[in-house]
Image (tube, grey):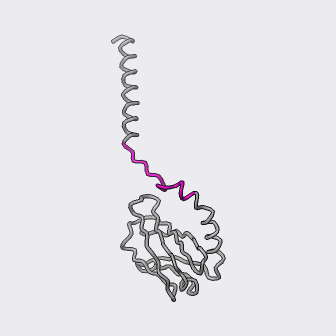
Amino acid sequence: MNWGVRIVIAFGAGVAFILFLVWKTMQVDIEMVESNYYEKEMAFNGRLQATANAKALTKPITLEKNNGQIKLVIDSSTAAAITNAEIHFYNPASEKSDKKMGIAASTSGLYLFSTTMFDKGKYIAKISFTSAGKNYYTEETIFIP
C-alpha cells in the first residue's frame, strides 16, 4: 500500500469521525432552564421588591422536610390575609418533575405537602403570595431522597 492510499484512508476516517460527532450532537435534547425567560426578566424588578418584603417579615418563611412531608410555615398574621398564593417546586434537572400548587389563606400558617408526589432530586421551592396588598417572594432549596 502506498502513501497516497494511506492519506485517503486517513482523510476518510477523519471525515467519518466528524460526521459521527455531528450526528451525536443532533441527538441531544437541549432544555432551556425557563421556557419564557423574557417575560420573567421583565417581572424581575417586582420580584426584587417582593423578596425584600419577605425578608422584612418578623418571622421568616421556613420550609423543611420531616417524616415524608414538606412543611411550609408562614407567620400566622401574614398567612391569614393571603389573597393570591402559589408554591412552585422547580426541579432544575427536569421540567417534567416541576409541581405548582396554590396556597389558601390559613390562620395557622402551616402548609403540608407529601413527598410521595415528587420525583427524587433537588427542588427549589419558589413561594410567592400577596398578603394585605403586599407581594412576597422567597426561594428555598429542598432535596427529596
Q: Please report the bounds of the magenta region as a residue range.
A: 27-41
Q: Residue at x 64, y 79 (%)?
A: 57
**Residue 118 horizontal side relative to residue 48, left or right:** left
Name the residue furthest bottom: 107
- Give the percent coordinates (x, y) of residue 32: 47, 52
In this rendering, is residue 108 above or below 14? below
Q: Main secondary structure of the magenta part?
A: loop
- Front-most of residues 111 and 43: 43
- What residue sits 41% from the left and 58% below the top? 94
Q: Position of residue 88 (x, y in %)?
A: 47, 68
Is residue 65 inside the magenta stretch? no
Q: Quadrant of the N terminus?
A: top left
Give coordinates of residue 37: x percent, y percent. 52, 55
* Horizontal side of residue 25 vs 127, given as left or right: left
Is residue 138 placed above or below 94 in the rendered structure?
A: below
Question: Residue 62 at x, y = what percent?
Answer: 55, 78
Work out whether residue 8 or residue 23 is closer to the camera in this orientation and state it: 23
Count of number-bearing discs: 0
- State the residue lying farthest toward the front: 133
Residue 34 in magenta stretch? yes
Tell me the quadrant of the picture where the C terminus can be found.
bottom left
Using the image, determine if residue 44 lies above or below residue 53: above
Q: Residue at 51% of width from left, 89% of height from top?
A: 107
